[in-house]
Amino acid sequence: MPLGTFDVSQSPDPAEWLATDEGERIELVAAAHRRTRASVGGSEAAHAAIHVAVENRLASGDAAVVAAYERFRAAGVDRHNTIHALASVVTDHMMAVLESREGFDQAAADRAFEALDPAPWKPRKR
């Protein structure tokens, strides 16, 4: 079931999101960033893939990710920056796997999501 479009500022329907092909999810996120001219800071494909990894965990109801997401949103962080904050944890733990050549430590990742501070991700007041 294709989504059609994706808006980074809106949560996709979890069932629709998970029913959409992974490659299509990545393209939908990349297209959304192009539409909004959002900076991806490097590889568009890598940025979109990490974004999708977070969206997948939210749509799947991953408790640690959902709790961190809700905490950030309650603290006033917009949805897109919240996804980027959560993606920072995913990226750190993916790099740890690559560097150590050991398995993914889900408990450590969950602790990192719990410890993630929303303050640096809030918009700065002018």
Image (cartoon, grey):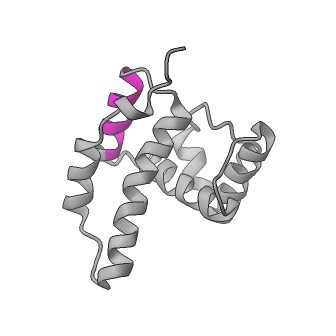
Q: On screen, 91 above or below 111?
A: below
Residue 101 within the magenta-colored segment of the rendering? no
Q: Position of residue 7 (x, y in %)?
A: 68, 36
| SS assignment for the magenta stretch, majority | helix
- Judged left or right of residue 105, residue 118 is right
Q: Nearer the viewer, residue 22 or 50?
A: 50
- Judged left or right of residue 68, residue 33 is right
Q: On screen, 67 above or below 62?
A: above
Q: On screen, 42 above or below 69?
A: below
Give the residue at the far top of this rendering. 126
- Judged left or right of residue 117, residue 120 is right
- Magenta span: 65-74
Residue 71 within the magenta-colored segment of the rendering? yes
**What residue is drawn where x is 60% and y is 46%?**
16
Q: On screen, 105 above or below 54?
A: below
Q: Position of residue 65 (x, y in %)?
A: 34, 45
When asked about the image quadrant of residue 58, the answer is: top left
The answer to whether any part of residue 1 appears in the image is: no
**What residue is drawn where x is 42% and y is 52%?**
88
The mark tally for this picture is 0
Give the residue at the far right of this rendering. 35
When asked about the image quadrant of residue 21, the answer is: bottom right
The answer to whether any part of residue 108 appears in the image is: yes
Q: Position of residue 26 (x, y in %)?
A: 66, 58
**What residue is drawn where x is 35% and y is 29%?**
119
Give the residue at the far bottom of this rendering. 101
Quarter of the C terminus within the rendering: top right
When asked about the image quadrant of residue 24, the answer is: bottom right
Q: Position of residue 103 (x, y in %)?
A: 28, 78
**What residue is drawn where x is 50% and y is 24%?**
123
